[in-house]
Amino acid sequence: MAILPVGIIMNGVTGRMGTNQHLVRSIVAIRQAGGVPLPNGDFLMPDPILVGRNEQKVRSLAETYDIARWSTDLDACLANPSDIIYFDAQTTQHRAESIRAAIAAGKHIYCEKPSAATLDDAIDLARRAKAAGVRNGVVQDKLFLPGMLKLKRLVESGFFGRILSVRGEFGYWVFEGDWQPAQRPSWNYRKEEGGGIIVDMLCHWRYVLDNLFAPVRAVMCLGATHIPERVDEHGRRYAVTADDAAYATFELEGGIIAQMNSSWCVRVYRDDLFVLQVDGTHGSAVAGLRDCRIQPRVATPRPLWNPDLPNPIDFRAGWQMMPDNETFDNAFRVQWELFLRHVAGEGPFRWNLLEGAKGVQLAELGLRSWQERRWIDIPPLNG
Ligand SMILES: NC(=O)c1ccc[n+]([C@@H]2O[C@H](COP(=O)([O-])OP(=O)(O)OC[C@H]3O[C@@H](n4cnc5c(N)ncnc54)[C@H](O)[C@@H]3O)[C@@H](O)[C@H]2O)c1
């Protein structure tokens, strides 16, 4: 049994996602667990170097999590041949340039979504990575959430019969920043800095719909900027230039209709921050981030419309909770482990930069649909 160190350059790791999901819950957790096991009994041990612009922040992050290496010089990091993976969780607009440099330096690439701010850049990255022969992946974390894995189990078992429709409710109230601090970074609300909920969420909906149900074939999206002014991290008022809600409908191959509401201006009266209902001829399911409830057709109540009487049916009681049947790890960590194994030559990894580009494509077409007030077909993407 050998411990095989894997050098990983982690950029943008002082941010919200970089610190919480990628460093602490993925890389640090994998290190604490002794590494990623390989079929031959060896273990891959992530050996990260944290990169950031602010020396004080990046050093203190490294010290907090007992990471020996940190730097403020990305080029110098890319020049070190023993760091074989470049990971990027910077704000979206800065991703493409850094990834291009990393590909040119021969690094394998793993990055947050959206993989780039524009479809042209996203495809360019996918093509460059392919031409350079480097392995590559984009975060598609929702696929590894327990609730979505349970839905996948249902689809694969044929539980739904013919799937008719999918409806998703995503969102929560993001405070405006005046009387309570906002719980998302202010760049999310500035288009010129890569913000906007359409760019943010349609990337997710593309891989969720494509992978769980059927390929997305067309989009119709209405965006909105409900809150026109917010207060940033420094207490300064700013004009919101990006959409903060998106009301989108998608046509999937085979005629499935999907509707996804995404909003940072909605108060939660549901079981989770994201809830997805799937209705099929033989059964329905409602999944959250972790749980999934089902109702087969044989257990479907017979409602009758009569507002003159109190409703006699306890609708929620007619659903059955699916069992876990396995232990679920953090979704980001699961995908990291698959990527690390893939880099070591163990196992495929289909969530690559071309798949990531499909998410950027759906976001761009969603924005265009809103602008032009019409349905838009989604052309195939060739890498
Ligand atoms: N997978 C998911 O569910 C998910 C959720 C939220 C965000 N994200 C994505 O993760 C990325 C980061 O989002 P976040 O919420 O962590 O943002 P954040 O603002 O908290 O962090 C951004 C990081 O980028 C760095 N950065 C900012 N401006 C920079 C610049 N000019 N040059 C270089 N580096 C710069 C910051 O120092 C920080 O490390 C975004 O692309 C976002 O779309 C993904």
Image: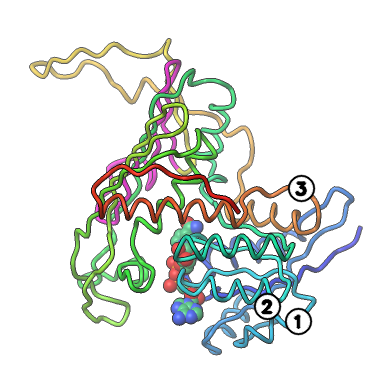
Q: What range is drawn magenta here?
A: 260-288
Looking at the rendered image, the quarter that the C terminus falls into is bottom right
**Residue 237 x/y as whole percent:** 21, 78
Residue bearing the label numbered 1: 80
Between disc 2 and disc 3, the foreground one is 3
Q: CA distance from mark 2 to mark 1?
A: 11 Å
Q: Is residue 87 above or below residue 221?
A: below
Instruction: Indicate how the structure is coloured in the image.
Output: rainbow
Count of residue discs = 3
Q: Residues within 10 Å of mark 1 (few under 14, many from 20)?
A: few
* Badge 2 amino acid: Ile
Residue bearing the label numbered 3: 347
**Residue 194 x/y as whole percent:** 39, 69
Q: CA distance from mark 2 to mark 3?
A: 25 Å
**Residue 339 x/y as whole percent:** 69, 56
* Badge 3 amino acid: Gly
**Residue 74 x/y as whole percent:** 62, 83
Residue bearing the label numbered 2: 49
Q: Earlier in the sequence, mark 1 or mark 3?
A: 1
Q: Residues within 10 Å of mark 2 (few under 14, many from 20)?
A: many
* Badge 1 amino acid: Asn
Q: Earlier in the sequence, mark 2 or mark 3?
A: 2
Which residue is painted at 71% across and 60% down in the image?
135
Q: Give the structural element (helix, strand or loop) at label 2.
A: strand
Q: Give the structural element (helix, strand or loop) at label 1.
A: loop
Instruction: Look at the numbered discs 2 and 1 and tell me whether their residues touch, using CB distance below 8 Å.
Output: yes
Instruction: Look at the numbered discs 1 and 3 and tell me whether their residues touch, using CB distance below 8 Å.
Output: no
As drawn, is 2 to the left or to the right of 296?
right
Q: Earlier in the sequence, mark 2 or mark 1?
A: 2
